[in-house]
Amino acid sequence: MPHIYSPTSESLRTYLSTHAHVLLALDTFLLSLRLGEFNNPSYSDIPSRPNEIPGSPSFRATDSGELKEEINKEGRKVSRSALTLKAMELVRSIVGTTKWTSAGELLIILEALGRLFHSSYAKDPCLSNTIRRLMNLVRTVEEDLKTPQPTPGALSVNTNLPLEGNIVPSGALSPPNNISRSTSTPSMTSAFAQNSNNTDLLYSNLDRFRSDSISMSETTTLTEEGPPNPTNVSGIARKLPGYFFSYKAEFRQMVMEGFQEVIDDLEEGRREINEQAGLHIHSNEIILTYSLSRTIENFLLHAHQKEKRQFHVIIAEGAPHFGGHVMANKLSSKGVRVTVINDSAITALMPRVNLLLLPAHAILANGGVVAPSGSHLCALSALANKVPTVVVSSLTFKLCPMYPHEGQDIMQDFVSPAFLGVGSESDNVDLICPVHDYIPPELIKLFITNVGGVLPSYVYRLLSEVYCVEDPIVFKG
Amino acid sequence: MPADEVDREDIKLQAVLLADSFTRTFRPASFDKPKVLCPLNNVAMLDYTIEWLASSGVEELFVFCVQHSDLVQAYVQSSTWTTAIKVTCVKDSTCTNPGDALRELDKRGLVRSDPFIMMSGDVVTNVDVREALQEHKKRHKSDSANMMTVLMKEVPHNSPLRSVSDDLIVGINSNTNQICMFESRKFKDSNVQIPSSFFDAQSNICVKSDLLDCGIDICSPDVLARFSDEFDYKDVRKQFIRNSVAEEEEGLQNKIFAHFLGSTEYAARVHDFRTYNAVSKDLIRRWCYPVVPDNLPSGYERKYAYEYSRHFVYREVKGNTVIARSTQIKNGCILGANANIEEGGRVGSSVIGNDCYLGKNVVVEGSHIWSNVQIGSNVKITQAIICDGVKIKEGAVISKGCVIGSNCIIGKGVVVKPYSRITCSLNTDEGDDGDDDWSDSEEDEDVKEDVGGGEFESEVEVVGDDGKGKLWHPVVTEEDGGSSDEEEEWGEGGGGEDWDEFVSVESQSIGFDVKSANEKKIKLQSGGGLLDDSGVSMGGGGGGEEGEWGSENDGDMFFEEAHVVGRQKGIDVVKELRDLCLEHDHNSSFQNLAIELNSFKFSQNATYEDVNCGAVLAVAERVKETLGDEGLASVAKVLGALKKELVLWTELFEKCTPRKADECGIIVGAERLVCLPGFEKFRAGGGFRFILQMLHDEDILSEEAIAVWKGRREKGEGSKEGLELFAEQSVKDFLEWLEEGDEEDDDDSEEESEEEEED
């Protein structure tokens, strides 16, 4: 039975080599990230595709209600929640079918997956967020399990490590004093800004650590006995304490339950957002929104249908993808009064507007938002006209632990200039078609999220509830 | 057979990839490794296609290799592709064309899925093929003769992705997208033929010349069977598709349809180095999103990662790429892993491969440098392809359109001429006619000969004393027995009779300007007469320097037969103009006649030269009438009469010569005049010279006009009679006299050159 020691794609592949169908599912998913249905700017209205072709491995039905329907209906145009769900299902199938034995190993698997997604052109931060969330879940479960366990047993558990036989040759092992080299790592007060390169160091030393953890079980036991004081243990040990590599019978069961909860969360998110619609949308209001967003669409429909509010929606078309046209059709078919305007008319119309609703591609740690290109213009114009800008978004997978200066590559993408509808007649003309805008927190009045209304300045607090500071911010490597 | 159908549905989607293009347009780069393994933006072309096929849902792929089949197989086996696709190599070294390959596949019976995708290994695309697959399935179900769907993209006619020599014209039934004509137009033809029978069968035909054949087909297995039946079919496009759509007899028809790509979908084939460059540029500029340099195919992401930065610059970030501060990188570049660029360099619109070293002050523009290339300081490379392992020593200059084959060495300070292709492979076939790049059996013989011939000898005059490599010339194909076949094979880039070998090499190189080539083509097609005035430059020196590209001679071939656009067919414009002038009454003003002539000129797209020529001929008619036979015998009388008449017409000539060059028409008219029946004696008495002198004396002809006319005749332009007259001693004397008269105030130097020219 293979084990996994480092979060690289090679070791993950070796680890999965005995599970051909899982590996196939993973590869298919990665392909669809790179070239397939997921690699579309989420706001664009790229020609929707006909139904599934039987035999194509691209999209197999998932087993969760509403989102699944969405996938089938929309063909290739996949919503980001569907993408997240698909990724979750994949992770669950990998975690559920392979024979990992400890929380530590599971964390390595998850990080390897995170890196795979990242290197597969996953511009969408929701994938790494999901992975990070799951990693946090694993840590929490492990911590919960640890507490009731009598510590004296730890030593014996450790010596029974299932990994024993698979450690690197002892000749390559470093002396114990090597462990202390990472003590310079600052404590976690500023951990979010921490350089993710540290993780490389962590994992390159991991095998070493594990072998050391046996030879130096004394140290490990000390850690477990003493209160978790980050300053008196070495950096590596602090990152993954030794008990993470011990086998616990009920762990798998609890993790799988936790996974299900996260999946449920995804689906609940939209309902919880919709329930707040009545609080924010009032009758006879004029609401401006930009391009296409399913969250906003559902939010508005809920206010219209359930809360019986009569309001008027102005939709900026969102050139050159024209998601606004789709949005207008969807809303008007349900009886909402809709006006579509060209993007250049946003400032002209803004004085009449009561509320600006914007979608989010990602919510950053400082409360800023990555949104479809053109949104910044809306927000600026709203500010000038004293119109409140409200971002409607679920936090479950859009909340990112990074600041605007980090992870630049995730925050922007340039799609084919063919969207601009002009040919390149001359070589001297550069045509670019960026997808996203960054809206600074100062322009945002409020977030309407699945945990209620949140101010931009409060966002960083939410981070620590869902992510662990020790997990990488960007899955590079 | 319902059971059968169910089975068919269950079979996985298969694809056939022809890993050999069966052409030699990629030489000399393809001597050492097959074209499909050549790097395009630092990724082997094969990887683009396989990645795309996998993402399109293809589960089993057959890679058909002929040339270098071992290399392809080794590559496929060693590659860590995704598990989503099963890749099998089919090797057959005896095939010499795509037709053979398909027959071989049919024989082996590997392809079972209906439909299957057939594509060539040098295609880069982001097409979502699923829609086309479904359409095809539906069509095939309704009629089993609907056996093939060809993917096509609308591109501007001038697009660099289109072949210059091979202009594809497709007739399409716009209701059903059925292809009913598939012709490629040679460079200089302006006409294509449409069989009239199609107008009965098809109601709504749209003939398009702006389509790009993407090289991706969706086929039913019947296509393979059809190739087995038609054992002489060699090419899928030029023979199978063309003949199938032209087949008129009901029941024998293989109906072929087109599927058009959406506006944001991209597909292009790398035919030759020119299209290689164009496709590379498009990828860098993200036209093929998500196939962009920072999104690497499976397997690559473990070794490399590219980061995109402003102005389309992509840098490798996993390796240790070092770029000096003072080096300018701009305008669409890719910098590979472990590239090292020293101070003062300039890299623009270029791709630099892995492990390359560029010395100080190196300038690289619009070029492709593959991996492991060492470039010394002060080297200048423009629009060239530098293959793996090349060394270029200090101060060398690689001019545009060059291809430097793997492991060549370019000596210190050597200037490589434009469009040179240099190789140091022993595997060439120089001087050996009838070789086939794609045929192992024949190539083996070549190799033996070459090896037997001894060591590799460098051409010192090309690569310098310290260099290694020799010039590679494409083999002219006509000598061989099977010349017609050869021509077919060449066809893709080359052009048989119209294009000589050199020009076809040029058109397949980077730096060839398609736009102006097309403009020239249109000019050629619309009549050579326009060519001289506009002086179209082809941006690529025939002999080396920039300059006119096959200009005048080319033009001349079509000077006479050319049909002028916008002119009634079969009309002799000069004669009509002459008749108009004859009708003119001396009592009315020339103003009226000028208006009349002018309007006729416009209606037939004629020139002022034609008008002047017609007027002179009208004068000739009048003189003939007044003098009678006896009068014509005397040179002096004729001249006198002509003078009297021509002076009268001066007013008209003035009106009709907005440019001095238009006065040439008068001389042309005079040329024709002296050749008219009845003027034989006048001509024999040196009449032409006297007319010239008289016209000059009377200020009807300016010296500039005479000079223009002289220039043209010296280049050999003009009718046979005109050239004969020009060669007459009396005319020469006159011209010389004229020249001397000029040079009384001028320098002597021109006189010397004048004499030289007349020798």
Image (tube, coloured by chain):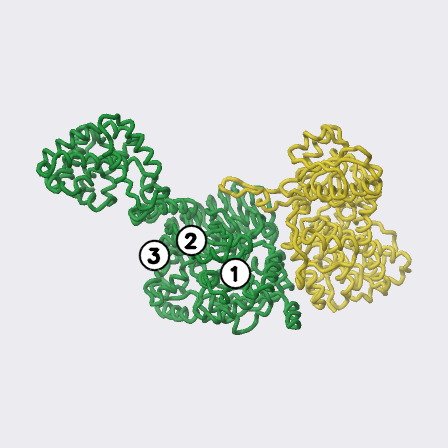
Chain colours: A yellow, B green
Q: Read off the residue under disc 2.
A: B508
Q: Earlier in the sequence, mark 2 or mark 3?
A: 3
Q: Residue at x 21, y 46 (%)?
A: B720
Image x and y of residue B367, in percent: 47, 49
In this rendering, does residue B277 appear at all? no
Image x and y of residue B335, in percent: 54, 49
> Would you call the spot at circle 2 few (<14 residues within 10 Å), some (14-19), or many (20 or more)?
many
Q: How much space separates mark 2 and mark 3, taking CA atoms?
A: 17 Å
> B550 or A348, which is in the foreground?
A348
Left or right: residue B161 versus residue A477 is left
Left or right: residue B279 versus residue B616 is right
Do the residues at discs 2 and 1 belong to one chain?
A: yes
Q: Earlier in the sequence, mark 1 or mark 3?
A: 1
Image x and y of residue A8, in percent: 68, 58
In this rendering, does residue B652 appear at all? yes
- The type of residue carrying mark 1 is Ile
Q: How much space separates mark 2 and mark 1, taking CA atoms?
A: 30 Å
Q: Read off the residue under disc 1.
A: B256
Q: Residue at x 78, y 34 (%)?
A: A445
Q: What chain does mark 3 sit on?
A: B
Q: Read off the residue under disc 3.
A: B497
Q: Quadrant of the N terminus of chain B?
A: bottom right
Q: Is residue A208 above or below residue B91?
A: above
> B49 or B354, which is in the foreground?
B49
Q: Quadrant of the C terminus of chain B?
A: top left
- The type of residue carrying mark 3 is Glu
